[in-house]
Image (cartoon, helix red, strand yellow):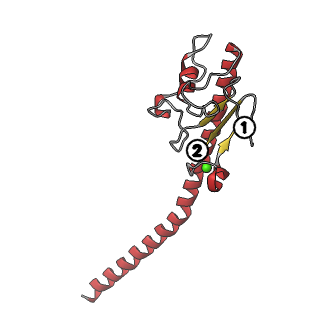
Amino acid sequence: MKNRENIKGFTLLELLTVISIIAVLMGIVVPIVSEATRKSKVAKSRATIAKIEMALSAYENDWGEFPPPPSNTAPDLNNNTGDLYTFLNARSTSGSAYMEIRTQDTNSNDQILDPWGNPYVVTVFFSGLSMPSNNNTTFDIYSLGPDGTTSTNGGDANDINNWSR
Ligand SMILES: [Ca+2]
């Protein structure tokens, strides 16, 4: 009986030790993994912004102007990238798309989504209709970043854009 209690007590101590070790390891590993994931998403977001930039430049090179803003929105609010998707995905003098956009990277409105699932905000210069506030003669592109919020209340601190890098 005494022997059995000893074995049981030792096993419980072992179990507690293992649980403690796992808890400590989780405390170290989880923040490292989540930080790595965040960095990876930021990098992916930057890469997509660069792709959109290249596609818009190629489009402008072919057609002499950037894709026009959606017809039913206010002049300087062409941040609905639905039409942009159509232009970048379908219209090219070479026959190929300016940008290969996978459907899983878009929402039901054909807006291109960032790694956090929010649409990139794209404002493209279009004579007489649209002028980006940062890159006046080309295009402003940004992701709302990990917090998914706009520039209100300091939410722009983690935005990823093409004018402040
Ligand atoms: Ca943000």
Camera-nearest label, 1 or 2: 1
Per the image, label 1 sits on a secondary structure element best described as: loop
Local packing at callout 2 (Cα closer than 10 Å; few below 14, some 14-19, many 20+) is some
Residue 161 % position (x, y): 68, 41
Quadrant of res 136: top right
Looking at the rendered image, the quarter that the N terminus falls into is: bottom left
Residue 96 position (above or below residue 55): above
Residue 145 % position (x, y): 60, 47
Residue at figure coordinates x 56%, y 26% from the top left: 70
Q: CA distance from mark 1 to mark 2?
A: 26 Å
Tags 1 and 2 touching, CB below 8 Å: no
Q: Is 67 in front, or is 148?
A: 67
Residue at figure coordinates x 74%, y 34% from the top left: 135
Circle 1 is placed at which residue position?
A: 133
Circle 2 is placed at which residue position?
A: 41
Residue 50 position (above or below residue 97): below
